[in-house]
Amino acid sequence: MSDLSLAAAAPDCADDGVWLACIECGEQLAPFDEPTYRCPDCGGLLEARYEQYPTFEEFSGRGVWRYDAALPFDHGVSLPEGDTPLHEVPRLEADVGVRSLRIKHEGMNPTGSFKDRGMTVGVRVAEELGVSRLACASTGNTSAALAAYGGRAGLETLVLLPAGKVAAGKVAQAALHGARILEVDGNFDACLDIVSELADRGEAYLLNSLNPFRLEGQKTIGFEILETFRDEYGRFPDRIVLPVGNAGNTAALYKAFRELVRAGALAEDEVPMLTGVQAAGAAPMVEAIEEGYEDTERWEDVETRATAIRIGNPVNAPKALPGIRATGGTAVAVADDAITDAQRALAEEGVGVEPASAASVAGLRKLREEGVVDDGEDVVCLTTGHLLKDPDAAAAAGAEPEPVANDTEAILDHLSG
């Protein structure tokens, strides 16, 4: 069973108050001596730990590095990232029927997704370790972010993609930023198996969310949501609804909240309920919540038009499942058509997102219909990637162009017809 408690005293292996801890057996490891992704003793997931955890008053500046007091370094390879908007969506709020609804749009990061937050920290750690090649498996957004930040740092970048399963906009980003792209005859989980083996052999530094430092950058999403919502409403949101692929964001937000509770900046009863949403064709986390599993069971065959969450073996489930349960949240699966409807609803409010992002709103709608979410709740939905990440899906969801004659009167007649 995962142990996500935060130790009070730094062990001898700590480096400037930072160390790694296994969430399964409690083994403590030096953070920057060598690349480490799993516990060498039991194979469990690792989590970054700190001697001190800051309060809101210790944060200053903007973006991800505003939160350097809660990160392993005080600066990183930056484009810059973070400081994304918390959109108002009044018509959608009224339609869903909650006290308040805001959209945290992570598609407004430099490469168009939340992955930039993890890469600014992860690539900084790679520099500290002195590695020369970065690598990831990806459904698209990770590859774009890694290529951009690796390029910025002057490091070789290798990405493994499932052949024919990644949106063209994301492949184009990785290619233009200079990554070496390998298309694998398999799904994302097969790609992650291979890149993990490459990392274990010392051939590359792994920057998927298996890497605990990736999640350190992503936890800043949670800090931003709480600060912005509190400043505008004078309270914290009741619930955060987010898409789930590899479950990295769910784990990262829960870590942000645990750290704030530890610091005394957030009361236990102020922690938002974490609510995960998956596509029905790729929903091992939902299955685990519904069946009471401690970990997910791998889905070998997954399919959904929400390509960014087409994942059957979420590596961060042992961190994310306790977060959902401990906060009183839940997980829900939604159909692809519901995801597309939510994508259109967001677009009508001026918020353009890729399909996987819209899963959060689709999930909220379903939970409201089922009476799981109350009408008095303050809700934030996380959208993880920009509309132009998947232009084909956007075109399919949008209205068809209407052919007209090359004549003003003909156009007026067409508009009035």
Image: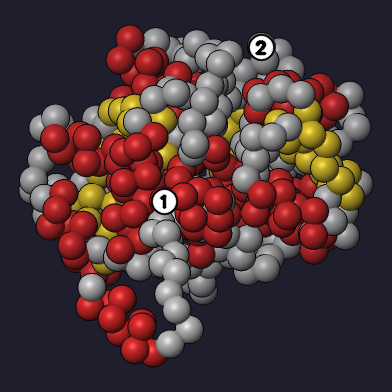
Quadrant in which residue 184 is drawn: top right
Asked which quadrant contains residue 414, the reply is: bottom left
Q: Is 233 placed above or below 50 here?
A: below
Q: Quickly name the residue at label 2.
A: 42
Residue at 37% over, 44% down: 340
Query: Mark 1 packing: few (<14 Cα in 10 Å), some, or many (20+)?
Result: some
Would you name the residue on which mark 1 appears? 397
Q: Is residue 6 above or below residue 190?
A: below
Q: Residue at x 42, y 12 (%)?
A: 294
The first of marks 1 and 2 along the sequence is 2
Name the quadrant of the C terminus: bottom left
Q: Is residue 29 visible?
A: no
Q: Amino acid at mark 1?
A: Ala
Disc 1 from disc 2: Cα separation: 46 Å
9 to the left or right of 145 = left
Residue at 62% from the left image edge and 28% from the top image edge:
46
Whole-percent x and y of residue 106?
A: 48, 57
Residue 273 visible in image: yes
- Mark 2 neighbour class, 10 Å CA radius: few under 14, some 14 to 19, many 20 or more: few
Q: Position of residue 155 (x, y in %)?
A: 87, 53
Where residue 16 appears, as percent x and y from the top left, is: 68, 49
Towards the viewer: 280 or 69: 280
SS class, disc 2: loop
Q: Nearer the viewer, residue 312 or 410?
A: 410
